Image: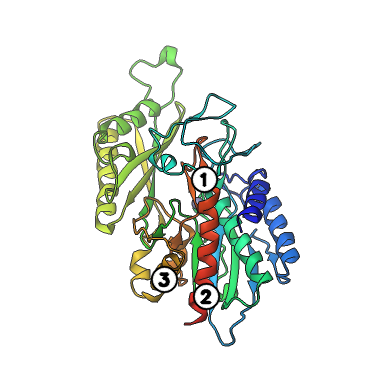
Amino acid sequence: MAPDLLARFTRYVQIDTQSRVDRERSPSTPGQLDLSRLLVEELHAIGVTDAELDEHGYVYATLPATVPDSLVIGLIAHVDTSPDAPGAGVAPIVWSDYDGGVIELPRAGTRLDPTTMPELAEKQGHDIVTASGDTLLGADDKAGVAAIMAAVAHMAAHPELPRPTLRIAFTPDEEIGHGATMFDIPRFGARCAYTIDGSTLGELQDETFSAIEVRTTITGVGVHPGWAKGKLVNPVRVAAQIVAALPSDRLTPETTAGREGYIHPAMFLGTTDHAEVRFVLRDFEEGLLKSHVELVRSVAQEVVASTPGAKLDFDVIRQYPNMLEYLERDPEVMAAAEEAVRAEGIEPLREPIRGGTDGSRLSQMGLPTPNIFDGGHEYHSVREWASLQDMAAAAAVIVRLAETWSRR
Ligand SMILES: [Zn+2]
């Protein structure tokens, strides 16, 4: 499947599908629809005749079963790319039979150095795909999209392979937390689903962060600075004091790993009229997540209380839950995935995701959806890269997964 997958992948990454925060419609950006329309066309060409793009930018399609009376299993990937780095004008480069050395990308002096990227160091002999140095690659999640497309094309061409009914969905706006928002679970009609949106070969994940966003808005008292003595209350200064008063040697993304959570000031906007800081709060434990909210609240209240004239608005927005709670109740979903990964000769890696996936909210909404690797790395950065062999392994795991479920 590798040549077909590579052709699809390089085609998909050249379409700018970057999503945008604070969306006004679904999808947040029109480029996502360009890829979604192409996927519908390609599914039709494969023979998946019911492939369709809905009014919210979701692609739904069905590959019928070859085993009678089998279940309906879902496959999901997201078409959008992260707003965290430039996403337009992606010029992919294939480094065939990678020699294990430093990869110097042609633009912006970007280097992929295996001495600081242990996962790249392991891929000597693989075909490595990168961007050109000044954009994302978009393997998150076009590696997942391409793996599903290549696997579906392969299974459609090989009706002798046993498979259940496969429902396919390509979602928009996952990177801004909306992949599941308009997902039509009844229409999808699957017993369970798998997102192909992990990273390292073998990853199989049933646990994500629980996620909350906190928005602190400070209103001050605006006065011309020339006549401001004793009158001006500057919300920019108050907001900066709040950020400075929070811990910086712990509870931050840059000082935590594994199962530790964090408080991350992710956006700071301010004028002398008002200022807003948005904090991303993450933890695997619900109780700890709540304690992070209370820490931000008490620090913000204290700082504002010590600044007469300043006013605080504090909003807590639930983003997604740890999906483990839902997947533990339905162990067959992970058992089938483990079996499929092992059947491909790969040892499953069961690390919790320090982030979320479409599956976090889909599982909560009633569609159990763990996450499977897709072979990409260094997501959301200009150093993003993917191994063709590992992407092809993800496609092979999908074919194994279909075989596994056809027996259940
Ligand atoms: Zn992703």
Q: Earlier in the sequence, mark 1 or mark 3?
A: 1
* Residue in front for this viewpoint, 170 or 179: 170
For the residues labelled 1 and 3, the Cα–Cα distance comes to 25 Å
> Dot 3 corresponds to which residue?
339
Q: Is residue 248 above or below residue 162?
A: above
Mark 2: few/some/many CA within 10 Å (<14, 14-19, 20+): some
* Residue in front for this viewpoint, 278 or 314: 278
Can the viewer see residue 179 in this picture?
no
Q: Secondary structure at mark 1?
A: loop
Q: Amino acid at mark 2?
A: Glu
Answer with left or right where residue 171 lies relative to residue 370.
right
Q: Residue 333, how many percent across, how many down?
A: 42, 73
In the rendered structure, find residue 126 and report the number of the disc placed on it.
1
Are discs 2 and 3 less than 8 Å apart at CB? no
Q: Earlier in the sequence, mark 2 or mark 3?
A: 3
Q: Secondary structure at mark 2?
A: helix
Q: Residue 60, how many percent across, how many down?
A: 64, 67
Q: Earlier in the sequence, mark 2 or mark 1?
A: 1
Answer with left or right where residue 41 lies relative to residue 148.
right
Residue placed furthest toward the bottom: 69
* Residue in front for this viewpoint, 97 or 392: 97
Q: Amino acid at mark 1?
A: His
* Residue at 39 percent of width and 30 percent of height: 220
Q: Residue 37, how many percent across, how many down?
A: 72, 57
> Dot 2 corresponds to which residue?
403
Q: Amino acid at mark 3?
A: Glu
For the residues labelled 2 and 3, the Cα–Cα distance comes to 10 Å
